[in-house]
Image: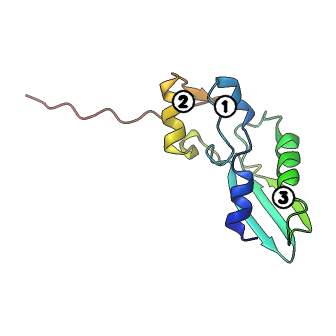
Amino acid sequence: MTEQELRERIQSIPDPCSLATGVPLGIGEMGLIESVTAHAGKVTVRMHITSPMCMMAAYFMREIEQRLQGLDGVDSVHVEFDQDLKWTPGDIHPDARERLAARRITMLGGRLLPRAEAPAQGGS
């Protein structure tokens, strides 16, 4: 499988924080997948977490392993987490941000979601 095909297999894994808001988003839409690499049967998935208090690392690891383990050409799956907390709400896919905004959700993962720019007002 290609790296893109592997990414497609995991991107719909539900993000528990978004589930709690009533607007379920996959980890792909959330911008949590940093990279997916495959070399000689070893797949490595690098992920962001939304908060230093995120307790979902084990859940994400289990879900990724279940979706990728045993696929043709996949011998092992390793999940690594970004400890530098590079994720920001701006990483959420724009369509997903619109769905969150439609529900008037302003925070996710303890961080304020970016708002769409208001149209410029004409001055007179």
What residue sits right under mark 1 in the picture?
Answer: 18
Residue farthest bottom in this picture: 40
Q: Is residue 121 left or right of residue 80?
A: left
What residue sits right under mark 2 in the picture?
Answer: 100
Q: Point out the frontmost of discs 3 and 2.
A: 3
Mark 3 → mark 2, Cα distance in angstroms: 29 Å
12 above or below 111?
A: below
Number of numbered labels in the structure image: 3
Mark 1 → mark 3, Cα distance in angstroms: 23 Å
Q: Quadrant of the C terminus?
A: top left
Estimate how packed mark 1 is, as few (under 14), some (14 to 19) or many (20 or more) residues with alpha carbons within 10 Å.
some
SS at badge 3: helix
Q: Which numbered disc, 3 or 2, marks the residue that appears first in the sequence?
A: 3
Residue sitting nearer the eye, 90 or 60: 60
Q: Point out the frontmost of discs 1 and 3.
A: 3
**Image quadrant where residue 96 sits:** top right
Q: Measured from the top left, where is residue 82 in percent x and y?
A: 75, 51
Estimate how packed mark 3 is, as few (under 14), some (14 to 19) or many (20 or more) residues with alpha carbons within 10 Å.
some
SS at badge 1: helix
Q: Amino acid at mark 1?
A: Ser
Q: Residue at x 51, y 21 (%)?
A: 104
Q: Which numbered disc, 2 or 1, marks the residue that appears first in the sequence?
A: 1
Q: Amino acid at mark 3?
A: Leu
What residue sits right under mark 3 in the picture?
Answer: 68
Estimate how packed mark 2 is, as few (under 14), some (14 to 19) or many (20 or more) residues with alpha carbons within 10 Å.
many
**Image quadrant where residue 50 sits:** top right
